Amino acid sequence: MGRRKGLVVLLTKNDAEGLRRALTTLVRQDGVRLGEDFDILVADGGSTDDTEEVVKEFQHVTNAVRFKVQEIKGGVGPARIEVARYALNSGYEWVVWGDSGNEYEPHYLTNLLRRFRSAECDVVSGRSVVKDLSTWSKMLYWYHL
């Protein structure tokens, strides 16, 4: 089986600093090549902060970072449908769903893809690990599942 290119999706709205951290951890992935093994799509729900400027910073480094403002507003559900259509129409063979609140371990995509490719399966799932920063981080863990 040949290599299959995928799309890592970061859903966001008004979280420019979180987006910067998420993108930084994705462009530093070990064992996979941004632009060859995967691209990144930032799907924006209509931010009024510096979200687009953050994306442009990363686009200056690589042309594998894409930016799309959500056409149909209404939260995560419509965003996922819109992005799924984008991924299918663009020829991506796999999608990793995330958001601007995620930070990725250096081998996250390598480990995910190894399992995906070895099992020849349709769905692979990881697990969220929330830093114990405060009571709020524990209480809002459900949001990042």
Image (cartoon, rainbow, N blue to C red):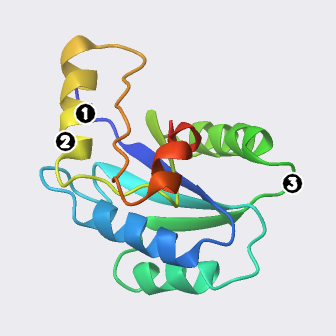
Say which amino acid is labelled 3.
Lys
Whether residues under marks 2 and 1 lie with C-beta atoms below 8 angstroms apart, the answer is: yes
Above/below status of 84 relative to 120: below
Q: Position of residue 101 (x, y in %)?
A: 50, 58
Say which amino acid is labelled 2.
Thr
Q: Position of residue 111 (x, y in %)?
A: 19, 35
Helix, strand or loop at label 3? It is loop
Q: Which residue is mark 1?
A: 113
- Left or right, 113 with respect to 63, comes to left
Q: Which residue is mark 3?
A: 73
Compare residues 118 and 54 and report the one nearer the observer.
54
Above/below status of 37 relative to 1: below
Helix, strand or loop at label 1? It is helix
- Left or right, 65 with respect to 130, comes to right
Helix, strand or loop at label 2? It is helix
Q: Which residue is mark 2?
A: 110
